[in-house]
Amino acid sequence: MIKPITYSNLSFSAEKTPNPNNNEYKDPLLKWPLRGAAFTNELGEGLRPLIGSYANLFWAPVFLYIGADVYDKYKNDGIEHSPNSRRLIKEACFQGFASIILPLVAIKGGQNIFSLFGHLGKDKISCNKQEKIIELAKTFVANGNMRAFENNDKECIDKFKYIVNDNLEFKSRSNLLKKVFTSVQKKLKINKPENIEKYAEKTIKELIETRKNLLNPTDEFKSNKKYANFKEALKRGETQTVATKSVLTKMLNSISLNSKVVKTIGGFIAVAFAISPIDKFVEHTIIDKYLGPKIDNIRKA
């Protein structure tokens, strides 16, 4: 999100030379489709729950746009060519807060708030917790634990539940913000330990059952799409172990899709409502009242 700061706030009349033609400066960076590059970071972060690390690619266009915009404001004061270092610094500060920091906070906040809607479902835990358990399950499968506990379902279930409990407890105390968020959830009676344990147990039981059906399919299961994917993997030359892991991982991705969609919607809604307040707050409070005067005083000194 980039809304250029008004030139009245960035230019300095004492340093300007009168323009006899009185030509109004037209910012080329405000024209579409070039202006669309200003919003790519918000698009990427909004989609991050669905596309993962690919969201990082969406940051390249916006950084190029910001660099061009800051340089343009340095050269031009809105009326004529008039390089000014203070205008450059103010524009850079504005873009840093209004285009990067605060929109990111809004998106992450919206995603975390909408994550709590998962508590309304039958599993009674947030979307964030569901996703984390699914990620742990994928690691559990990738490390060969399903095969290691092939003949001992109870030990497999207990092992996975131990991993989930240990990992989630560690994460909650390793990060201050997560610790605060966890405290709020406890007060709201969200993500109760017993519900997390039930979800973890349900997840690992589904994996165990699916694995058994893949290796020893019933006539009914042979018509299942999972088994069809398993057979296709074998035809491609994958070993039975690799093909099983592939099907189980795909199954876990499908389970977590709904929670990711909910978080994605939350992020976009949050930033949509925050766009205008963020611009006004940064321009009129952060720049005009705090950073702007300090930058001017540095130059005067």
Image (cartoon, rainbow, N blue to C red):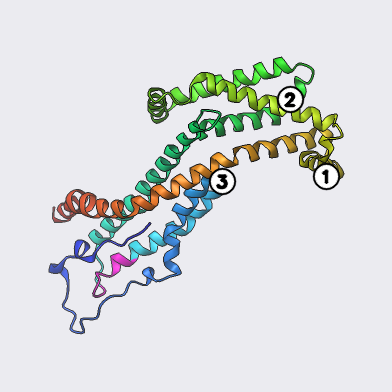
3D distance between C-alphas at marks 1 and 3 = 26 Å
Q: Position of residue 113 (x, y in %)?
A: 42, 38
Q: Nearer the viewer, residue 266 or 155?
A: 266
Dot 1, crowdedness within 10 Å: few (<14), some or many (≥20)?
few
- Amino acid, disc 3: Leu
**Which residue corresponds to the image point at 45% horizontal and 45% vertical from the top-left?**
266
Q: Magenta stretch containing residue 76, yes or no?
A: yes
- Residue 206 lies left or right of residue 110; in this view the side is right
Label 1, secondary structure: give it.
helix
Say which mark, if any, is on residue 18: none
Determine if residue 122 is in view: yes
Magenta region, residue range = 72-81
Residue 132 lies in quadrant = top right
Say which mark, if any, is on residue 50: 3
Q: Which of 260 and 71 is in front in this view?
A: 260
Q: Where is residue 61 in the image (x, y as percent from the top left)?
A: 47, 59
Dot 2, crowdedness within 10 Å: few (<14), some or many (≥20)?
many
Q: Is the magenta stretch mostly helix, strand or loop?
A: loop
Look at mark 1 in the image and give the residue it sits on.
232
Q: Where is residue 157 in the image (x, y as percent from the top left)?
A: 67, 19
* Mark with earlier residue (2, 3): 3
- Residue 255 lies left or right of residue 60; in this view the side is right
Label 3, secondary structure: give it.
helix
- Amino acid, disc 2: Met
* Mark with earlier residue (1, 3): 3
**Which residue corresponds to the image point at 46% horizontal and 57% vertical from the top-left?**
40
